[in-house]
Amino acid sequence: MKKCKNIECNNEVNKNRTYCSLKCRNIYVNKYLRDYNKNSEGLKKKSKELEEEYNKSPKKCKYCNEIIPFDKKTNSYCNSSCMASHTNKFKIGLKRNFSEEGLKNIQEANRKRRELPDYYDNPNRCTNCEKGLEYKRRDCNFCDNQCKKEYFSKNREDYKIYHSLTKFKFNLADYKDEFDFELLEKYGIYKASNNGDNLNGVSRDHKFSVKEGFRRLINPLLLSHPVNCELLKHNDNISKLDKCSITIEELLDEINKFDNKYGRYYNDELKIFISTDEMKELSTT
């Protein structure tokens, strides 16, 4: 037995081999045999040739007409000052296109826009602290992310109960026309890494999200209905967060169509029938 030719390795090899592995061979050759100076010299030579070629017809600054150096050949200006002087020239020209009255109207509109939060009266209130929402958050339910965290933290136990009531208890095979089984066949069902390890699988998603339902105090029976379920890749389901892909009105309409097609949906765990008329009452309580 003899030692590997790589001086950094102490492994033994057979007589008919020089290195113990391809990795050892690459380390030894790249570190001790190859001369990279030739490559460096070649690159310098190539760069010099390109610079000489560029200097025959160099690019000039759009503003001052000075020659742009080779190392800045992709720029359109020789420096930032020239760029600012050139572009600001056109901005000044635009102002002159406005009449004096038109310019005053624009300035007045901008002033009102800046002052809008002071006099804007939003009828919506933060779900957590009940303060009036600012204009920029007029479509939100909370005045900031901290309020959102506090709300769900205070109601964590209630949310756990609510969430358990929104779980889908039906068998997908009972409603074959309602779901995309091709997606399920392609990716399989989602399984955690400690229970099957199919992280790219498909999971059931609530079209009208559970968090939004809890926030708006919508009865959880609505959200456990089959029409509120869709099959999504688990990664897409997670990235959706608490966004809704359906409104409460659209959900009620879909439940009505479902009743006409299949009859009332029966949730075996809750031991009750769910009808559209009952849902309309529940969604407003």
Image (cartoon, rainbow, N blue to C red):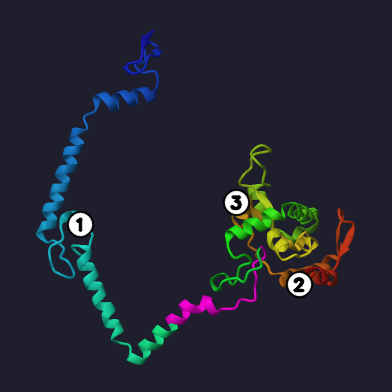
Percent coordinates x, y for residue 42 in the rendering: 17, 40
Q: Which residue is mark 3?
A: 235
**Disc 2 versus disc 1: nearer the observer:** 1
Percent coordinates x, y for residue 123 in the rendering: 64, 76
Q: Which residue is mark 1?
A: 72
Q: Is residue 110 left or right of residue 40?
A: right
Between 114 and 160, the one lying in front of the other is 114
Mark 1 vs mark 3, CA separation in Å: 44 Å
Q: Which residue is mark 2?
A: 253
Mark 2 vs mark 1, CA separation in Å: 63 Å
Q: Is residue 50 above or below residue 77?
A: above
Q: Residues within 10 Å of mark 1 (few under 14, many from 20)?
A: few
Query: Residue at coordinates 14% horizontally, 52% vertically from top-left?
Result: 51
Q: Residues within 10 Å of mark 2 (few under 14, many from 20)?
A: some
Q: Reading the chain from its start, which is encountered first: label 3 or label 2?
A: 3
Percent coordinates x, y for residue 79 in the rendering: 20, 62
Asked whether disc 2 touches disc 1, contact meaning CB atoms under 8 Å apart, the reply is no
Between 127 and 263, the one lying in front of the other is 127
